[in-house]
Image (tube, coloured by chain):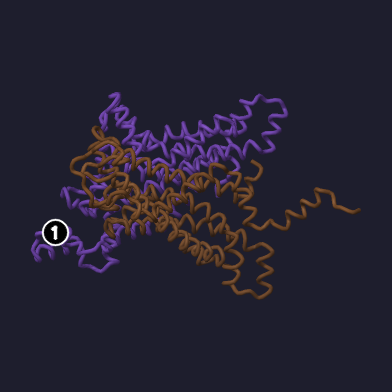
Chain colours: A purple, B brown
Amino acid sequence: MAAYIAKRLLGLLPTLLLVGFLVFMLVHLLPGDPARLAAGQDATPETVELVRKDLGLDKPLPQQFLRFVTGVLHWDFGTSLRTKRPVAIEVGSRFMPTLWLTIWSMAWSVIFGMAIGIVSAVWRNRWPDRLGMTLAVSGISFPAFALGMVLMQIFAVDLNWLPTVGDDTWRHYILPSITLGAAVAAIMARFTRSSFVDILGEDFIRTARAKGLDERRVVIKHGLRNALIPVVTMMGLQFGFLLGGSIIVEKVFNWPGLGRLLVDAVDMRDYPVIQALVLLFSLEFILINLIVDVLYGLINPTIRYR
Amino acid sequence: MATLPASVASVVHDTRVRTPWFEFWRKFRRQKIALVAGAFVALLVVVAIAAPWIVPYDAENYFDYDALNARPSLAHWFGVDALGRDIFSRILMGARISLAAGFVSVAAGAIVGTLLGLLAGYKEGWWDRAIMRLCDVLFAFPGILLAIAIVAILGGGMANVIAAVAIFSVPTFARLVRGNTLALKHLTYIEAARSLGASGRTIVFRHIFPGTISAVVVYFSLRIGTSIITAASLSFLGMGAQPPTPEWGAMLDAARSDMLTAPHEAIFPALAIFLTVLAFNLLGDGLRDALDPRIERR
């Protein structure tokens, strides 16, 4: 197992390097002179040259890339052009609110999504299935930002049950995490249903029924465990979706997280912050997929790690 | 024996007309919901094309200053926005933008992705590794993040959003088609074609490609829904269509400040996005059920 994880981590290196290279190139693909961008609109040519030297932008590209990679490995992403503070600090203070938001969304979308999926599969083509699948297809068709606005209007403004914006208490998490998780819950429900329908048609399920097990045991003990395997993979992929979705939901709920930082940074063309965030989001996504692969083996003992 | 038994006659009849198209239509016809969704999509396409001629008011340059934020009425079916523009006209013109964004981006992604997938699957070896590595890298960015990064480089605007969405559609199609190609290329009919001296190009485009079409069509429909949402999301974030363009996501963003006094300004664009994406998703589901042979019995 440990050897497998080590091997997978090594296998990530080329992907990480490529992602890093693309992120590094971002600055050079931006229209205009990055040194002028960093120095500011009103800087004199002398200042721009000084900034260029300071940022190493006068060196050849490979050398600049090396400098970038070394910086990243030392947790040094440069200085935010907007606030003039180190990017690592800017990002650090925004990290936890986004992480908690995605974890909450994941938790409840897995619970609701799988419950709806299992119910739909067990009562296939009957009314619980129709209701569940109607909800699910609506969930993937309703854009998160519209859902967020609707939920905020109903539960925060009209009914005044929950706070509108910010992240001060656990009650602040309810609406944003539901908004963010809705689409994932819908995808999980559809996926769980089809995976379960496949499993329930297998011979070993027929055997379990034939030997007289009651239906609940058949579904939970024999069905669930096998149906979960593809569902867990799906979960990992959806985590990336949540990371991306958080960018939108954070704008709706004025959430002090990474997503809003990214949107602001793009608006202000604060490229060191954009670089750090794109890198961080991708790294998170890649690591989560690794964790999912490892989990995969814990649920499915037929997979042997080599 | 003067006449054949009825069952034999019907078998003879069936084999005569069972072209792939007929077979597809026979199964698709049974999907009532997908048929309705398909009709709705067709209606949307007509509306989108005809929009400039059928809108009651100019979507960008007509301002009714006496009816700012007015609720829906006979004169303004969907009401009036904060600047005095007719929301119904803006929704109709917005259909043009959203459908074009969804269709163009996915079509570009599907063409490039399919070509890469055919190449990777057919050549294998070095080509396969290079293309799949590229896909891994594109997959390493959550979709919308990639789009934001591209918009950060190219600048905002709908054209760049479409380019961004196209780029992140590429790996999905590449992987899908590669998988199908790998499965198809070892079948006997491909071997037969090769032994007859067919060139690589003929084998790929005449013999392998048709086998991948059904999967591509299903993904195409499902991806359009996702892409419309992504494009609208980017506009909502202020990175896509810029005011006064009547893009649905941008309209929702503009409606946020007036949610209390004029909720209709948010409701109609939200409904427009929802119904459009829903129609594409239901159509895609129906296509999948009609085209996937495994689903026949369920």
Expressed as whole percent of the image width and height from the top left, the position of residue A34 reads 20, 62
Question: Which corner quadrant of the image does residue B253 belong to?
Answer: top left
Question: Which corner quadrant of the image does residue A165 belong to?
Answer: top left
Which residue lies under the disc numbered 1?
Answer: A39
Question: Which corner quadrant of the image does residue B184 belong to?
Answer: bottom right
Q: Secondary structure at mark 1?
A: helix
Q: Residue at x 33, y 43 (%)?
A: B269
Q: Residue at x 23, y 38 (%)?
A: B69
Q: Residue at x 23, y 33 (%)?
A: B261
Q: Quick check: A105 left or right of A124? A: left
**Dot 1 surroundings within 10 Å: few (below 14), some, or many (20 or more)?**
some
Instruction: Say above or below: A58 vs B48.
Output: below
Expressed as whole percent of the image width and height from the top left, the position of residue B278 reads 45, 43
Q: Quadrant of the C terminus of chain B?
A: top right
Q: How many numbered marks are there? A: 1
Q: Quick check: B55 left or right of A14? A: left
Letter of the chain that mark 1 sits on in the rendering: A
- Mark 1 is on which residue type? Ala
Expressed as whole percent of the image width and height from the top left, the position of residue B226 reads 42, 48
Q: Is residue A76 visible?
A: no
In front of the other: A251 or A77: A251
Residue lying at the far right in this picture: please name it: B1
In front of the other: B199 or A44: B199
Q: Quick check: A162 left or right of A46? A: right
Residue lying at the far front in this picture: please name it: B74
Q: Is residue B34 visible?
A: yes
Q: Quick check: B209 left or right of A214? A: left
In front of the other: B17 or B132: B17
